[in-house]
Image (cartoon, rainbow, N blue to C red):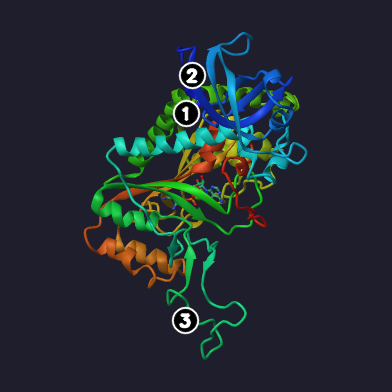
Amino acid sequence: MRAAKIKTLLETSEVNQNCAVHGWVKTFRANRFIALNDGSSLKNLQCVVDFEKLDDVLLKRITTGAALHLEGVLVESQGGGQKVELQVETIHILGDSDPDKYPIQPKKHSLEFLREKAHLRVRTTTFAAVMRVRSALSFAVHRFFQQQGFYYVNTPIITGSDAEGAGEMFRVSTLDLNNPPRTKEGALDFKKDFFGKETNLTVSGQLEAESYALGLGEVYTFGPTFRAENSNTTRHLAEFWMIEPEMAFYDLNDNMDLAEKFITSVLKEVLENCKEDLEFLDERLAKEDQSKPQAERSPMGLIEKIKFVIENDFKRVSYTEAYEILRNSKPNKKKKFQFPIHEWGVDLQSEHERFLVEKHFNCPVILFDYPADIKAFYMRRNGDEKTVRAMDILFPGIGEIVGGSQREERLDVLEKRIQEMDIDAEELWWYLDLRRFGSVPHSGFGLGFERLVQFTTGMNNIRDVIPFPRTPQNAAF
Ligand code: 4AD
Ligand code: MG
């Protein structure tokens, strides 16, 4: 018999039907009750076996972690915990598990411990819930853009350009590290490398997305990006997924409007479609909060926080206004910031972003018009000659979730900036061409997908919202 999904059976009103299920044993109690989970639902299906009819050898093989195929009759449950249960008639052990060695025991494990068992952690209730929400979020992302008439473009993962100009890239090469070819001058000879030039894993698909926006109008990318920054924080990964919409004929205000609508739409969709998982994660966070000192506890529950973001407008503040707020703030005056705010033009650290979002405004904040010197070369220069049309969206508990800008569409201004910043203009010949042939005002942004999953699931560490995290000194699995 073909196995039904446990989720479907738990929701059905058709009892007394013959059915089959398969999944992994979460617990086996009293030689009688198997809690079976197949990943389709947060809840397990209670499967009741008649141990008197089973031989002892088979019974012993029903252990936590074992994979089973069960057939029987779905009946109204006698016990209180569930509506239906399976009265088991036949048992097939699909895969045994050694109960003494299986690391996922039916008890609370720390997230740190589970990171070392990343290949098995999705069998825990928490990780299964997080990964189902992650899946729903990525579907919501596509649905949002498709409904708005955007085209999905796949930008290259191997590139020759450093889009962000930050130089934090992973080299892609087939050269023999032990005996690399050298030029007459003794430098590495990349002409002999696979692509005949230096190449890296992309840090962003933006530049290529711009090329497609200036032809298809409105496009978005959703793919992996790579950064070799040595940041061991709860918000940084060396490999993360980014969503980058890019729109012709949009100015910065249109860009901010789209970003806000995008975030609230996907959150709304997930709130509707992942109720059970989010309720579980909400409770989990509340329990975790209780073990923290009062001052560190979150003022809102998880679902409450998501609803708050959906229902309230993001606060839009220019960098200069934010700078004034920070300069005059209590923590700055009392020298509580690790990086004190003195002069206009400093880059904002996460302690400043957190102050603005969590203490001052108490809502998501869009900061715009940043000093040119702390932003990338491609951002459109304002008339003041000091600031660029950049925008960052800051979220409570997360910090920066979106970075974007209106792009510099004027060839002369862009060329000058590239020169000032000492960027290799030759590599960017095609990007400059976009300003030579039918250039138009255009804008876009990048949203760090894992940071969105973190916000939605309430997981504190970004390593716990991606199946196999890549961080400095760690590429296990
Ligand atoms: O602010 P970033 O660097 O912007 C760009 O890459 C632009 N090219 C985007 C664009 O305009 N198309 O990165 C965008 C977002 C950040 O706001 C953050 O959410 C996320 O990507 N991000 C990271 N997420 C996880 N780990 C990292 N190391 C990240 N670096 C950036
Ligand atoms: Mg940024």
Is residue 12 or residue 210 the one in the foreground? 12
Residue drawn at point x = 60 percent, y = 42 percent:
462
Amino acid type for the residue under numbered disc 1: Met
Which type of secondary structure does the marked residue at label 3 adopt? Answer: helix
Asked whether the beta carbons under mark 2 and mark 3 sit within 8 Å of each other, the answer is no
Q: Which one is closest to the eye, mark 3 or mark 1?
A: 1
Q: How far apart are marks 1 and 2 (CA)?
A: 9 Å
Name the N-terminal-most of marks 2 and 3: 2
Q: Which of 319 and 464 is in front in this view?
A: 464
Q: Which of marks 3 and 1 is nearer the N terminus?
A: 1
Q: Quadrant of residue 117?
A: top right
Amino acid at dot 2: Asn
| Residue drawn at x 55%, y 42% as measured from the top left | 323
As helix, strand or loop, the secondary structure at mark 2 comes to strand
Residue 232 image label: none
Q: In this view, does 205 lie above or below 103?
A: below
**Number of residues whose C-alpha sits closer than 10 Å to that of mark 2, classed few (under 14), some (14–19) or many (20 or more):** some
The label number, if any, that marks residue 18 in the structure image: 2
